[in-house]
Amino acid sequence: MKALVLYFSLTGNTKFISHIIRDAIGADEARIPLQGEGVQFENYDVIFIGTPVWAFGVPRPLQRFLEKTTISQKRIAIFCSFSFIQGIVFSGLRGLLKGNTIVGQRAFREPRRYKSKYQAAIAREWAQAIMAS
Ligand SMILES: Cc1cc2nc3c(=O)[nH]c(=O)nc-3n(C[C@H](O)[C@H](O)[C@H](O)COP(=O)(O)O)c2cc1C
């Protein structure tokens, strides 16, 4: 199964988890905004999509990206990093990803600052379980 980790990250927390997942399952990665050529989403069986929480929801740059990009009929696992309130980030992401199957969701509290090793281990185990399911 071929996997992609697609993420948006301003200060590195979501990037930290994205890289843990990428390395745990041998996935490709793409950071938003994308550099160079667009990603061929159809090449992937599973897509992990990661985001920080901004203003209790999905950051505008990721929202705009998902609105103008066609990703459909994929198995998608969503994750976020946040500092105090997750808000409606997961329902927001699910709304933007209609037409796909959400196979998991996980939140990480500023993993570069808090319990990094522990949160990394959770991310690794979570991603491996999704790939095995
Ligand atoms: C503009 C902005 C808005 C934010 N709003 C929230 C919020 O509503 N709830 C929350 O828990 N954290 C909020 N945060 C904190 C980030 O979600 C948190 O630091 C996250 O781990 C950052 O991810 P990143 O390092 O990948 O950019 C906000 C951060 C920024 C910059």
Image (cartoon, grey):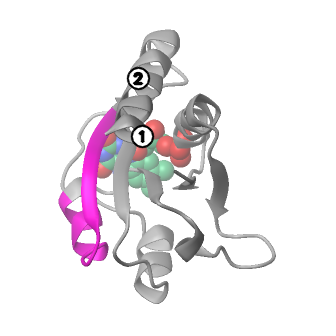
Residue 104: where, in percent of width, then height? Answer: 27, 45
Label 2's element? helix
Please state which of residues 125 and 32 is positioned toward the viewer in this rendering. Answer: 125
Badge 2 amino acid? Glu
Classify 91 as above or below 52: below
Can see residue 109?
no
Horizontal side of 14 relative to 72 (left or right) equals right
> In the rendered image, which quarter is residue 110 located in?
top left
Say whether mark 2 is within 8 Å of ligand 1.
no
Badge 1 amino acid? Met
95 within the magenta span: yes
Query: Residue tagged by mark 2?
Result: 125
Residue placed at 43% from the left, 11% from the top? Answer: 118
Say whether mark 1 is within 8 Å of ligand 1.
no
Please state which of residues 76 and 109 is positioned toward the viewer in this rendering. Answer: 76
Q: Are marks 1 and 2 in contact (CB under 8 Å)?
A: no
Residue placed at 23% from the left, 65% from the top? Answer: 94
Residue 116: where, in percent of width, then height? Answer: 51, 16
Horizontal side of 107 relative to 112 (left or right) equals left
| First to last magenta residue range | 91-107
Q: Which mark is residue 131?
A: 1
Residue 19: where, in percent of width, then height? Answer: 63, 36
94 within the magenta span: yes
CA distance for labels 1 and 2 = 10 Å
